[in-house]
Image (cartoon, rainbow, N blue to C red):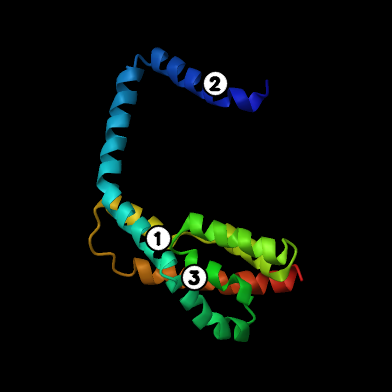
Amino acid sequence: MKFTDLVIPLIAALVLIYGLVKKIDVFGELTEGVKEGLHVIYDIFPALFCLVLTVAVFRASGAAELLSCALEPLFSAIGFPVECAPLAVLRPFSGSGSIAVFQDILTQNGADSFAGRVASVILGSSETTFYTLSVYFAATKVKKTRYALPSALCGDVVTMLVSALTVSMLLN
């Protein structure tokens, strides 16, 4: 048995011992935390459902591929690998969808190719912007997002550009 197999049980034991020493009702606190967590899930579920549905429609309709094709001339003009266009388009919307695109890029081009390296940097340094914003704003009940979405999308664009630049400067 490895130590890593014991980490979770050790943490649980430490929490129980701490609760006993401080005379805290650990089970009561646990059930209260679960109840609060279920309320959070209840609050954010509609936003998550809409987001997942929208991403599924976006991919199934071919809109993601159409947008990628439309952006290919711009990407090739700035030195961004055209093979990564679908990843750049899909990453702000869907984590699982972008991982599927990432796997396709690695399968078709190889992990050590320029496209494979850029895709790896993008996946490791970017966020699923719409998912994160929808969960955060649904959980905090923020209605007026102001500049959050434009700022986050600007960050996504910078991430895509800098990933290609960094890979070309450091790894190629």
Q: For mark 1, does the 10 Å Cα neighbourhood hold few (<14), some (14 to 19), or many (20 or more) residues?
A: some
According to the picture, the residue beneath numbered tag 2 turns out to be 10
Q: Is residue 46 above or below residue 11?
A: below
Where does residue 28 sit, x and y in percent of width and height? 30, 20
Q: In the rendered image, which residue does mark 1 sit on?
A: 56
Residue position marked by numbered label 3 in the rendering: 89
Q: How many marks?
A: 3
Name the element at disc 1. helix
Q: Earlier in the sequence, mark 1 or mark 3?
A: 1
* Tag nearer the camera, 1 or 3: 1
Residue under the image location 49 percent in, 17 percent down: 13
Identify the residue at the far front of this view. Answer: 61
User: Would you identify the image quadrant in which residue 79 lies?
Assistant: bottom right
Q: Amino acid at mark 1?
A: Ala
Q: Quadrant of residue 10?
A: top right
Q: Measure how far apart labels 1 and 3 are at the Cα level.
A: 14 Å
- Residue at image position (28%, 64%) is 145
Asked whether the beta carbons under mark 2 and mark 3 sit within 8 Å of each other, the answer is: no
Q: Residues within 10 Å of mark 2 (few under 14, many from 20)?
A: few
Find residue 20 and report its horizontal and vertical position in percent: 40, 13
Can residue 15 be spotted in the picture? Answer: yes
Q: CA distance from mark 2 to mark 3?
A: 43 Å
